[in-house]
Amino acid sequence: MTTLYQKVANDIALDINQGVYLAGQKVPSVRTLAKIKTVSISTITQAYALLEDQGYLTARPQSGYYVKDGANDPIEPPPVSRGSEPTEFTKSDLISMMLNAVHQDSLVNFGAAIAHESFMPQHTLQTHINKTARFQSKLVFNYLFSPGLESLRRQIATRMRSIGVKCHPNEIVITQGCSEALSLCLKSCTKAGDIIAVESPCYYGFLQLAGLLGLQVIEIPTDAQEGISLDALTLALKQWPIKLIAVSARFSNPTGSAISSSKQKQLYELAKKHDVSILEDDIYGELGFNESINSVIKTFDTDGRVMHCSSFSKTVSPGLRVGWCIAGKQHENIITAQTYSSFSPSSLSQYTLSSYLESGHYDRHLRKTRSIYQQNIEAISQLVKQFFPSRTRISQPKGGFIIWIALPEHTDVMALQKDALKVGINIAPGAMFSNTNEFDHYIRLNCAIPIDANVSQGIKTLGKLAGAQME
């Protein structure tokens, strides 16, 4: 939960980022700001101390607080990636090794893209678990079969209307998180040896899945802000027999890029022209900071070629393991495959989520967490800008809770990860997100963690370690 002094600090940080207070300018005195904000002097003192730790302010004895040099400097995003020709995935062992480090307990978890438990509606969910277990025990302790609980599918269909996807509950399949949704969809329309196109960088779990299925992966140049390059994708479609395009329209992992609605429609038309399927991962889609992206690629689908996948793992609970897919032409194939593999996710999880969604708590929860994640991304980005080596470039996502960082070239990120783990900090190395070596000097940081002294010190320590690696 954000405390009062943290809220005040976030307001001042936003003013600094927007140029209300410029580098070298004095900010209001503690007493003055306490009167303006109608809070205690102690609250302002704590807020200014936090801003000093985050690199926004510097204190001058007998004078007050001033905006630190460089605090207003614009953040430069990572460059457009280069992409690759089709190759078989070769990094499964490397990713497995990295995941053991990324998910181990540590003092500061920048590695795993998992929201801190304090940002999840645990107490509310517990109420719904108790209610469903008590009053629907005959149902929740029995099997549910594919396509899953009808009331939950109806709730999801209603939510999809807000982004222009008009689907019937019978078109939705409930899955074991987004990972099973992606797996079922990919298996339904590819076979070993097929070529698929992905963003570069790409979510490592999808790359692993492609490797297990014997698929060849072609990485398409991608802008860290605006997403996959349609020009590069067009050339690839002309040159190679691509079977499927895997993409995230809203807040891709790891870049956080977002594809505009007009570009989404162009991407769909391009796939239709070349008769290629689209696999859309929208797991971060409901964590947008504004309403500028109010569509997905599935919005424009008129012939069922877009397979849309998502989950409640990033918004409600990763442990409930409830996701879904709207698979269009592959719907029946997916139901058959799921029936003979996992049946359907946990009955208790599905009934709990259905009850939770029907209560109206979800949208209120989303409004709260979106605000927190936006503030956290801004705060951590500012710390990175202040304490990482010069020429470091930082993505500026408009949703989700991760940032993608390009360190100066020749930085040994694998050595950086090992050094960081020794002091209780984990990170996700960029090498996990590509079959090439292009992102070996990149890292991904999780921002869905409470911003406290440990986090501030963790960024400072990472910056020092990165500087040492460069030397």
Image (spheres, grey):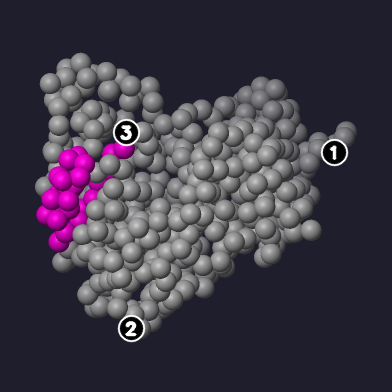
Quarter of the figure with residue 422: top right
Q: Specify whether residue 326 is in view.
A: yes
Q: Are marks 3 and 1 in contact (CB under 8 Å)?
A: no
Total labels drawn: 3
Residue farthest to the front, as pictured: 93
Tell me where the magenta segment starts and ends, as one range: 320-344
Image coords of residue 386 (percent x, y):
71, 50
| Residue 238: mark | 2
Q: Nearer the viewer, residue 380 or 72?
A: 380
Q: Residue at x 66, y 25 (%)?
A: 43
Q: Residues within 10 Å of mark 2 (few under 14, many from 20)?
A: few
Image coords of residue 355 (percent x, y):
22, 28
* Secondary structure category for the residue under label 3: loop
Q: Residues within 10 Å of mark 1 (few under 14, many from 20)?
A: few
Is residue 333 rendered magenta in the image? yes
Q: Quadrant of the C terminus?
A: bottom right
Give, as a three-letter code, the residue at label 1.
Answer: Arg
Cα distance, mark 3 to mark 1? 51 Å
Where is mark 3, residue-wise? Answer: 320
Where is mark 1, residue-wise? Answer: 60
Residue farthest to the bottom, as pictured: 239
* Secondary structure category for the residue under label 1: strand
Q: Residue at x 75, y 33 (%)?
A: 29
Q: Residues within 10 Å of mark 3 (few under 14, many from 20)?
A: some
Q: Specify whether residue 226 is in view.
A: no
Cα distance, mark 2 to mark 3? 42 Å
Residue farthest to the right, as pictured: 62
Residue 197 lies left or right of residue 277; in this view the side is: right
Quarter of the figure with residue 10: top right
